[in-house]
Image: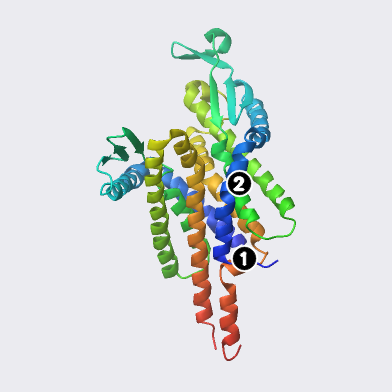
């Protein structure tokens, strides 16, 4: 348990600090966030032709409402938590890598759902948008991370059961 | 107590979350008051040159600075003829409480209220740290050079990083870690991570 806590904390704080560096923000985080905005808009556009995306902004031209995806809204922090948990738990490197990649996809799928839901919620009621954005969605995203991590632990447990020596 | 299955556990959590958030919203300043009081005392003790008063307005922590602004210059409040104030939304930190409550009460355990109270105390301590970090960031951005004239303050990068960490990471992660720590020996974890599968495979092997 103490080994898990130490590795988890070191990786969590280390990756978070790395993410906050200006150079990392400019080279990786901001382009990724723009890409996330484009993907989200790409999912909405076939159903709503009033939507455009530029940079980190998704705008509804008819409703005259726009959201900008900022640091803390791109799922990167949730992914860092998942990476810290996976790296801290004993497994092979292939298992860890697979868990991080699949977990990243699960977190981002949830995050795109979050962006789209907030985009429409904001057009309906700004107070509800603020409340959901600041308090509800961070919890749901972290719950998603927890589910992914528990599923990963179950997978590891079954793998161990399958290779019990005879 | 019989541990729940994974689906049932997460189902309970999802069912409990709306109730927990409604109670948290209704309690409002009751949950914020203790942490704002402690954070306010800490800030006034640490930065008496900059802070004259810290109060609670609903769920907002109001920091009244002992300086004001006149023609773009930061001056003592008496000279400036006004007083700068900063407001912090405590809910951006205390939403960890309903999240923890949902995880905690979805997990069957002995002395559940006592354990919840201990967890709540730890979350309150983390919220105090978060409020202090947020206040430092707001004062740094609002007061500029005047802020750094105070001796013994951390560098700007450290203030920025601890603020980001305490707002972006701590509120969603701390409840999960607290819950995992208290549930680790309660039979839930082996059930969640499918230890029975491992035991079953072991018992079915020829040599047991």
- Residue A160 image offset from top left, x and y in percent: 52, 77
Q: Residue placed at 44% from the left, 14% from the top?
A: B72
At numbered mark 1, what does the secondary structure look like: helix, strand or loop?
loop
Task: Give the position of the C terminus of chain B as an image quadrant.
Answer: bottom right
- Residue B193 image offset from top left, x and y in percent: 56, 68
Tell me how far mark 2 sits from mark 1, CA to CA.
20 Å
Residue B171, by quadrant, is top right
Depth order, front residue of A85/A153: A153
Depth order, front residue of A147/B48: A147
Q: Residue placed at 33% from the left, 36% from the top?
A: A66
| On screen, residue A128 above or below A18 | above
- Binning the other alpha carbons within 10 Å of mark 1 as few (below 14), some (14 to 19) or many (20 upward) gives some
Residue A161, label in figure: none
| On screen, residue B1 above or below A47 | below
| On screen, residue B100 above or below B44 | below
Which residue bears the numbered disc 2? B20
Residue B4, label in figure: 1
Depth order, front residue of B110/A105: B110
Residue A56, by quadrant, is top left
| On screen, residue B139 above or below A15 | above
């Amino acid at each position: 348990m103490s080994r898990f806590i130490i590795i988890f904390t070191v990786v969590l704080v280390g990756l978070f600090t790395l993410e906050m560096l200006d150079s990392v923000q400019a080279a990786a985080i901001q382009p990724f966030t723009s890409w996330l905005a484009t993907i989200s808009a790409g999912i909405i556009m076939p159903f709503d032709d009033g939507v455009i995306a530029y940079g980190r902004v998704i705008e509804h031209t008819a409703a005259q409402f726009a959201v900008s995806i900022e640091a803390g809204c791109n799922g990167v922090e949730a992914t860092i938590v998942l990476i810290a948990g996976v790296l801290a738990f004993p497994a092979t490197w292939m298992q860890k890598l697979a868990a991080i990649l699949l977990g990243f996809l699960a977190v981002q799928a949830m995050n795109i759902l979050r962006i789209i839901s907030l985009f429409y919620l904001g057009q309906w009621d700004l107070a509800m948008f603020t409340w959901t954005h600041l308090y509800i969605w961070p919890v749901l995203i972290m719950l998603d991370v927890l589910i992914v991590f528990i599923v990963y632990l179950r997978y590891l447990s079954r793998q161990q059961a399958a290779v019990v020596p005879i | 107590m019989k541990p729940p299955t994974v689906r049932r556990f997460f189902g309970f959590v999802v069912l409990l979350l709306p109730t927990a958030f409604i109670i948290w919203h209704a309690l409002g300043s009751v949950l914020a008051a203790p942490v704002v009081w402690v954070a306010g005392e800490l800030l006034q003790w640490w930065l008496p040159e900059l802070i004259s008063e810290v109060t609670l307005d609903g769920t907002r922590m109001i920091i009244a600075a002992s300086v004001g602004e006149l023609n773009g210059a930061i001056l003592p409040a008496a000279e400036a003829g006004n007083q700068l104030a900063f407001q912090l939304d405590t809910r951006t930190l205390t939403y960890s409480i309903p999240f923890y409550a949902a995880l905690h009460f979805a997990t069957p355990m002995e002395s559940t209220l006592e354990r919840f109270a201990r967890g709540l105390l730890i979350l309150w301590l983390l919220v105090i740290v978060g409020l202090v970090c947020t206040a430092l960031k707001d004062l740094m951005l609002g007061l500029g050079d005047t802020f750094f004239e105070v001796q013994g303050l951390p560098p700007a990068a450290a203030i920025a990083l601890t603020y980001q960490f305490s707002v972006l990471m701590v509120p969603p992660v701390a409840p999960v870690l607290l819950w995992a720590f208290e549930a680790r020996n309660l039979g839930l974890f082996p059930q969640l991570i499918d230890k029975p599968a491992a035991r079953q495979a072991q018992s079915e092997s020829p040599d047991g």
